[in-house]
Amino acid sequence: MNGKMSSDDEAMNDKEKEPAGTDGGRLARTVDFCRLIDREKMIQRRTWLSDGTRLENDAEHAWHLAVMAMLLSEYSNEEVDLLRVMSMVLIHDLVEIYAGDTFAYDAEGVATQKERETAAADRLFPVLPDDLAAKLRGLWDEFEAGETPEAKFAHTLDNFQPLMLQAATDGKAWRESGRRLEEVLHRNAATPDGSEALWQYALDNFIRPQLDKGHLAR
């Protein structure tokens, strides 16, 4: 998970035409959507890859979450429908194609995030045939509401993954931005709701070691 738009987003926001086959048949509309979501690869996040060489993009983040869901679902607080969780994490950031990535610690961006992303969802999912649009929009709405066991676990993974990469890069982004512990804890206030086990692991292995090293300010 994530409002400022990246330079790539800004460059194509108004210049890119809507998919050509939107008014065509079912297959044409579905293929148009498949082509459209390639733009997710162009949305840069603020999380460094584990080797610290570059920032990850939205598509890489979504793939990572889907594999982690498959591997870590046993640690969910409640039993979950794994396919639903994987589907949710794969599509949860697609709206950023139009809304841009919202940095978690950008208060101004966070204040307008819901409005921007809802408008983006209204624009994005109707590219699909009605039944598929309803299916994906339903998954996105469920994730945003964060009330079902699947949505809670998906949110936990969405927060756990950046913490894992922070630790892998020895707190690179935290060091560069002078991030404080209280900010990280506030950002992760709901992380235990999906998995207390993963949150405790993150505290012990990702957050506290960086705090002890001074890479995360007290």
Image: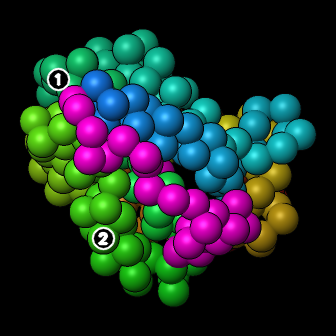
Q: Is residue 2 magenta?
A: yes
In the image, the segment drawn in magenta is 1-26
Q: Is residue 62 above or below residue 16?
A: above
Which amino acid type corresponds to the residue marked 2 in the rendered image?
Answer: Ala
Q: Quadrant of residue 12?
A: bottom right
Residue at the image point whose x is 82% and y is 61% from the top: 175
Q: Position of residue 61 (x, y in %)?
A: 56, 37
Q: Characterize the local packing of mark 2: few (<14), some (14-19) or many (20 or more) Cα atoms within 10 angstroms.
A: some
Question: Relative to residue 8, is residue 39 drawn left or right?
Answer: left
Say whether residue 12 is magenta: yes
Which residue is the site of mark 2? 119
Sequence-wise, the earlier of marks 1 and 2 is: 1
Depth check: 126 or 75 in front? 126
Is residue 202 visible to the viewer in this orientation of the structure?
Answer: no
Query: Marks 1/2: CA distance?
Result: 29 Å
Helix, strand or loop at mark 2: helix
Tell me how the rendering is colored: rainbow
Query: Which amino acid type is shown beneath numbered disc 1?
Result: Val
Residue wearing tag 1? 80
Disc assigned to residue 159: none
**Residue 49 pos. (x, y %):** 75, 37
- Characterize the magenta stretch by its predominant secondary structure: loop
> In this figure, what is the number of numbered marks?
2
- Provide the secondary structure element on which disc 1 rests: loop
